[in-house]
Amino acid sequence: MVRIVQIASEIYPLNKLDEICTHIEHCGRTCYKSENLITQETAIPFISGILKSGHESVIEHANVIFSMPINAKNRKVFEMRDVRGLYSSLEKDPLNGNELIVVSGNMRSFRDAARLYNVHDFLYIIGNPLFYIKENEGLSFDDLKIESVQQSRFSELHNYLTTHSTCDVGAYKDITRHRLASFSIESTRYCNYSKGKFGAELTMIDPCNIEKNSPMYDEWLNAMNCIEKSYMKMAELGAKGDQLRMLLPHSTKADMIMTANVAEWKHIFSLRCHSAAHPSVRKVMKIILGECYKIWPQFFNEQYEEFLAA
Ligand SMILES: Cc1cc2nc3c(=O)[nH]c(=O)nc-3n(C[C@H](O)[C@H](O)[C@H](O)COP(=O)(O)OP(=O)(O)OC[C@H]3O[C@@H](n4cnc5c(N)ncnc54)[C@H](O)[C@@H]3O)c2cc1C
């Protein structure tokens, strides 16, 4: 019998600079289903492996916010248009009203800034040589300093949230269309659910748009159990993950890690909390909107009123 679980979402917080590596490992291992291997020593080897294999999207889940004074040299940051995930703006500091340049991005964007523009400042100031592209290059900016990680007192561009959602494959297919967000997702190729580690069973998301204890629900459940039977039979016949996943339906449970800044989250909620979106996508997104509203009522008040308060 397939296991049935509910849609869920939670925040993966990143609060301090020295938690960047453990945060990235936590995000990455959720997708490999190897969280049980995490110890105090595993983050560095895990990230080294990721960087060597070029699987850099995992390091997109850690964001850092910087500021620097406005001058001609520092304004060059606005010319770095080709670095995806790097945001820069002129802002007024809410603490003292001073104008400054605020720059933020994720660890991948800082590595791309080094590769594309030979700008190593972000990586050097973060200070973990694991992420460096080259050692001992000069600095490009004056007085660049770290403000915080993930959240800041600045605008929507410079506030980020990482979430872990348990949703169905259909929902994650829709959600991953949002190109300005970063994703890491449980692989249906590398997770072989016939193995003991997965309880030798398939896990499905309870369909929120099919009424429980109805003939339609019974039919859905029957189909899921048939698929599981065939999956286990094919595994017995020697099928590999690549072959087995051809059987998996849209209801299959997937773990999805997603990081975006507030500007992109707002765009996503406007499309995906709307009644035109698929009900399971809406359910995931409304949970996350509720969390965003708790953290940043100033940014999400309108969407909270539109989609959750009513
Ligand atoms: C109700 C609904 C039904 C849908 N039906 C279908 C469907 O039948 N078939 C289908 O294929 N898709 C469908 N989609 C997906 C939809 O077309 C988008 O791919 C998805 O919603 C991502 O949104 P986005 O493109 O606005 O923004 P994101 O990818 O989240 O990007 C945010 C913004 O960045 C800008 N941007 C990002 N990348 C580019 C780029 N390369 N060029 C220019 N601007 C860019 C745009 O301003 C964009 O609005 C549907 C979506 C919804 C909500």
Image (spheres, rainbow, N blue to C red):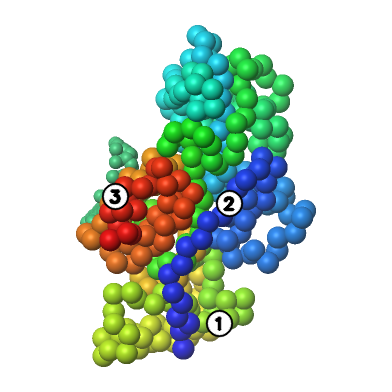
Q: Which residue is mark 2?
A: 13
Above or below for 42 versus 280: above
Crowd rating for badge 3 (residues with CA inside 10 Å; few <14, some 14–19, many 20+): some
Quarter holding residue 12:
bottom right
Is residue 10 something one can see in this rendering? yes
State left or right for residue 51 relative to residue 263.
right
Task: Give the residue type at disc 1.
Answer: Ala
Say left or right for 272 vs 146.
left
What's the CA distance linking mark 1 and mark 3?
A: 39 Å
Asked whether the viewer can see residue 185, the reply is: no
Mark 1 or mark 3, whichever is nearer to me: 3
Question: Where is mark 3, residue-wise?
Answer: 270
Residue designated by label 1: 200
298 or 29, which is in the foreground?
Answer: 298
Please tell me how crowded label 1 is: few (under 14), some (14-19), or many (20+) other residues with Cα within 10 Å: some
**In the displayed image of the protein, which residue is found farthest to the top?**
72
- Label 3 amino acid? Ser
User: Which residue lies at the image location 43% right of the left edge and 70% below the top edge?
Assistant: 7
Front label number (1 vs 2)? 2
Position of residue 32 relative to residue 101, above or below, is: below
Viewer-nearest residue: 165 or 190: 165
Distance between mark 1 and mark 2 Cα atoms: 32 Å
Nearer to us in this view, 169 or 192: 169
Task: Of the two numbered discs 1 and 3 on the same chain, state the one appearing first in sequence.
Answer: 1
Is 118 placed left or right of 281 in the picture? right
